[in-house]
Image (cartoon, rainbow, N blue to C red):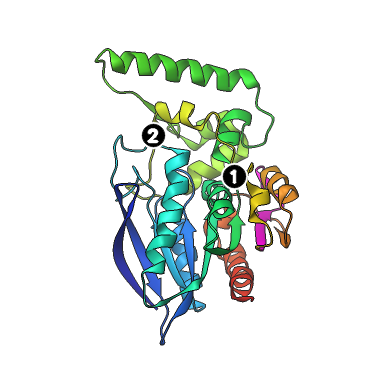
Amino acid sequence: MSKFDISFDSNGITLAGHLYRPDGAGPHPAVVVGHPGSGVKEQAAGLYARLLSEAGFVALAFDAAYQGESGGKPRGLEDPAQRVEDLKAAVSYLTTQSSVAADQINLLGICASGGYGLAAAATDHRVRRLATVSAADIARVFRLGADGTQDPAVFQGLLDHAAAVRTAEARGEAEQDLTLFPDTIEQARELGGEHGAEGFDYYRTPRGEHPRSAGTMPWSSVDRMATFDAFAAVPLLGSRPLLMVAGTRAVSAWMSVEAFQRATGPKELHWVEGASHVDLYDKPEYVVPVVAKLAEFFAAG
């Protein structure tokens, strides 16, 4: 297996990626791997891409526009429309590679990219098979909370603040960002329960932290996400196979269930016993068998 630094265009923005290529003559089947919200290609997406490459796939992990090593301003922006376009652009890039079998390109979305991947694959018929791991619709996370029980007033307050920030910036005041993580894991647990603490443990400790992983996002991300619905187009997957992987302890699992119920073609919801949402990012006891499941799924005719 070899890894290459690559770049490609997405709607006029240059994206940075890592292309993992298996040994042996091609062309090989391929997988685009999308990273979680606030993540970068060196974290969960890169781990899955490397392991899939070792299983015989060309795998592409990349930084979303405005994030990581990719271009675009303002930095850290979470724009659902652009994130969907990024995944389609990654598919386009793979179609240009002689090492890739262009009719065997698949998509894997992790966390927020699971939601974005559903929207991208639904309308891009070049995607042969779609899989998600700990799928999340980031708009639902902000509107309803990771567990789906958030008081609607919370999101209304976020929209109030996003509107005020837009006005302030229009008047020339300094740009303001929304902080994604508090200062300590105790604060993260108080604000977001065990799910919040798990996110902190992955993104803000040596376990998974990376200097380019976003700790903030522009407030304009909030109203961009407000009306996005990652699951609306799921029926458009039609007869293309769907595999959704979720942990039995994941507070976000309700989103995988909801999306799964909307799919009308061949589908499987694969439960990982004892795993939380974030466990599936990097813990070998969960990731290794999940990758074996994914490899079997993507290799199927």
Instruction: Inspect the magenta stretch and tell me whether residue 290 lies in it.
Output: no
Asked whether residue 189 appears in the rendered view, the answer is no
Q: Is 242 part of what is drawn in magenta?
A: yes
Q: Secondary structure at mark 1?
A: loop
The type of residue carrying mark 1 is Ala
Instruction: Name the amino acid, label 2.
Output: Thr
Where 212 falls versus 268 (above or below)? Answer: above
> Which mark is first along the chain, 1 or 2?
1
Examine the rendered structure and indicate whether residue 97 appears above or below residue 85.
below
From mark 2 to mark 1, how far is it between C-alphas?
A: 19 Å
Picture coordinates of residue 187, whole percent (x, y): 51, 30
Instruction: Using the image, tell me which numbered label, if any, was put on residue 216.
Output: 2
Q: Is residue 61 left or right of residue 137?
A: left
Looking at this view, is 25 or 185 the one in front? 25
Q: Position of residue 205 (x, y in %)?
A: 43, 47
Q: Residue at x 59, y 60 (%)?
A: 130
Image quadrant in which you'd find residue 266 = bottom right
In which quadrant of the rendered image does the C terminus lie? bottom right
